[in-house]
Image (cartoon, rainbow, N blue to C red):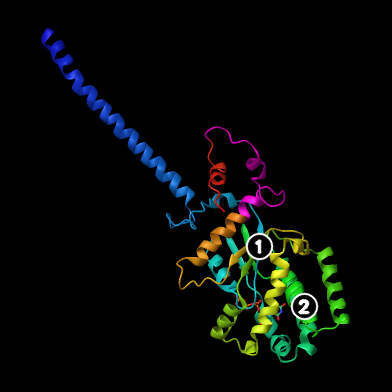
């Protein structure tokens, strides 16, 4: 009995050490699992952890139940289609490309081609038809959390129509007829938008890309024409005083001069930035996000979603 007692106390120190080591090991593995879970959730859409642009910590679950509409604007050949193609791979986004094929086939004729051949004759007809097809897209039923539209009725009006008018291709009468149509549509059937993304690309870069893609109708486009369209985009989107033209919806300006051949995941990063910009400010607007009330409350102690995403805002 005494022997057992002595042996027990003799082994006590060693057992205590062993228990401490076990506890430490268990605690470490719990911490490891917690760290992995948090990292996976925070970087769900940003696969390249370590790259500052990718570490925008978008939590896709925040998009559940949301209905956001965005448009991508920018000069001819600024890179809009490439950006939209990037969204095409996302499970949360649906993409509406500009219906150029419709403009190239109207009752068996190529209206886009005619417009470039003779802007004075076909300019107004073309812009009216663009307005119709864009309004159709604006009011298409949305099924996924984010709908990405290439251009909008606004760029037809404030960039292309305005450019034709200021370069005296269209006269006052034609301008008035179009704007009456436009204003009436914007009052009776306004597009619902949550964000305008402006791909800001210099006219020189656009001309280079335009030459590379060789779209038949566009062979006569000059640097001057691209410069004047660029000026119209700048006047509208780079000047907050003119954001009333599109009911002051937020504008995100992205650098379209960057070349995806020189920068890995360029468009993936742009997508992340867009979703981020969309999610956070828009979460405070009453219209489109069911998490509004949550985001405005004081987070309960120890809570994660959706506050954790808010903490990691880096834009
Ligand atoms: P964009 O709408 O600029 O499309 P894109 O294919 O050039 O875009 P990106 O390369 O950035 O993907 O122009 C398509 C053609 O239609 C172009 O020749 C300009 C013309 N156009 C007008 O003339 N008036 C308009 O209102 C619009 C929307 C386009």
Choose between 222 and 67: the one closer to the eye. 222
Specify few, some or many for label 2: CA neighbours under 10 Å numbering under 14, 14-19, or 20 or more. Answer: many
Give the residue at x 79% y 78%. Answer: 128
Residues tagged 2 and 1 counted as in contact (Cβ below 8 A): no
Residue 236: give x, y in percent of width and height: 73, 68
Residue 233 forms part of the magenta stretch: no
The stretch in magenta equals 278-302
* Ligand 1 is within 8 Å of the C-beta of the residue at disc 2: yes
Residue occupied by mark 1: 70
Where ligand 1 lies, by image quadrant?
Answer: bottom right
Residue 306: give x, y in percent of width and height: 57, 43
Choose between 20 and 252: the one closer to the eye. 252
Q: Closer to the N terminus: mark 2 or mark 1?
A: 1
Give the residue at x 42% y 54%. Answer: 50
Query: Along the horizontal axis of the image, is 275 left or right of 163?
Result: left
Choose between 262 and 126: the one closer to the eye. 262
Give the residue at x 73% y 61%. Answer: 240
Residue 167: give x, y in percent of width and height: 77, 83
212 shown above or below 236 = below
Query: Along the horizontal axis of the image, is 88 left or right of 171?
Result: left
Query: Along the horizontal axis of the image, is 213 left or right of 133?
Result: left
| Displayed quadrant of residue 84 | bottom right
Residue 253: give x, y in percent of width and height: 62, 64
Total of numbered circles in the picture?
A: 2
Q: Is residue 152 visible?
A: no
Residue occupied by mark 2: 161
Q: Secondary structure at mark 1?
A: strand
Residue 298 forms part of the magenta stretch: yes
Query: Along the horizontal axis of the image, is 276 left or right of 226?
Result: left
Specify few, some or many for label 1: CA neighbours under 10 Å numbering under 14, 14-19, or 20 or more. Answer: many
Q: Is residue 115 visible?
A: yes
């Amino acid at each position: 009995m005494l022997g057992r007692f002595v042996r027990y106390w003799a082994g006590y120190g060693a057992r205590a050490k062993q228990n401490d080591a076990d506890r430490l090991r268990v605690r470490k593995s719990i911490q490891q699992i917690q760290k992995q879970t948090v990292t996976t959730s925070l970087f769900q859409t940003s696969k390249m952890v370590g790259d500052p642009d990718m570490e925008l910590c978008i939590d896709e679950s925040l998009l559940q139940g949301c209905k956001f509409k965005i448009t991508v604007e920018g000069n001819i050949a600024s890179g809009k289609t490439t950006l939209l193609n990037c969204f095409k791979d996302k499970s949360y986004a649906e993409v509406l490309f500009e219906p150029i094929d419709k403009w190239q086939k109207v009752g068996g004729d190529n209206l886009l081609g005619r417009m470039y051949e003779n802007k004075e004759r076909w300019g107004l007809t073309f812009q009216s038809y663009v307005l119709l097809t864009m309004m159709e897209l604006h009011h298409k039923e949305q099924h996924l959390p984010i709908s990405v539209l290439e251009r909008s009725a606004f760029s037809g009006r404030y960039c292309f129509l305005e450019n034709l008018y200021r370069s005296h291709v269209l006269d006052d009468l034609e301008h008035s007829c179009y704007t009456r149509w436009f204003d009436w549509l914007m009052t009776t059937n306004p597009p619902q938008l949550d964000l305008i993304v402006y791909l800001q690309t210099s006219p020189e870069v656009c001309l280079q890309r335009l030459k590379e893609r060789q779209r038949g109708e566009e062979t006569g486009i000059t640097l001057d024409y691209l410069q004047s369209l660029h000026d119209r985009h700048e006047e509208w989107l780079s000047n907050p005083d003119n954001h009333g033209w599109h009911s002051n919806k937020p504008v995100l300006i992205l650098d379209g001069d960057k070349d995806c051949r020189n920068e890995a995941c360029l468009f993936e990063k742009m997508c992340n930035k867009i979703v981020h910009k969309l999610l956070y400010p828009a979460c405070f607007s009453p219209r489109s996000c069911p998490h509004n009330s949550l985001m405005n409350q004081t987070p309960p102690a120890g809570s994660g979603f959706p506050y954790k995403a808010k903490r990691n805002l880096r834009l």
